[in-house]
Image (tube, rainbow, N blue to C red):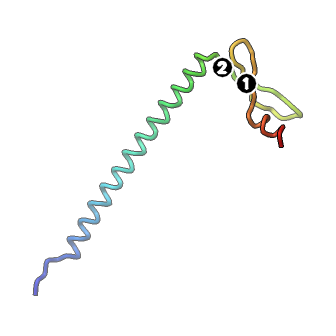
Amino acid sequence: MWDFDLVNTFADILLQVQAVIKRTKRKWELQHQEIVKCKYWLCKDAAMLAGLRLGKKTENGKKRDNVLIGAGVPIFDLRDLHSSYT
């Protein structure tokens, strides 16, 4: 009796919603990438201003990163501090 073609209408609405979701996800991904880049540069600049230097240290045949601040004062690795208590 009444034929409003609801199946096609709902299918069209579903396609529109899916397109909006896809655009929104892409927009969020681009913004996320920009935020990560900004955080990287801010951390790099802060480390440079603090005088942090990264060196390599060999212990028991294993190479480890050694972070120094200022005139060569080492910053303790929290993993080493944790393993000394266990």
Is residue 50 positioned above or below 31 on the image? above
Disc 2 packing (10 Å; few <14; some 14–19; many ≥20): some
Amino acid type at image mark 1: Ile
Residue for point 72% across, 20% down? 68
Q: Earlier in the sequence, mark 1 or mark 2?
A: 2
Residue for point 39% across, 45% down? 28
34 displayed left or right of 48: left
Residue for point 44% across, 41% down? 32
Amino acid type at image mark 2: Leu
Is residue 3 positioned above or below 74 on the image? below
Q: Residue 17 versus residue 52: which sits nearer the camera?
A: 52
On the image, which quarter does residue 65 sit in? top right
Q: Which mark is residue 75?
A: 1
Is residue 40 positioned above or below 83 on the image? above
Question: In this figure, which residue is indicated by the disc labeled 2?
Answer: 52
* Residue with the most extreme left position: 1
Element type at marker 1?
loop
Specify the quadrant that holds the N terminus.
bottom left
Q: Position of residue 49 (x, y in %)?
A: 58, 16
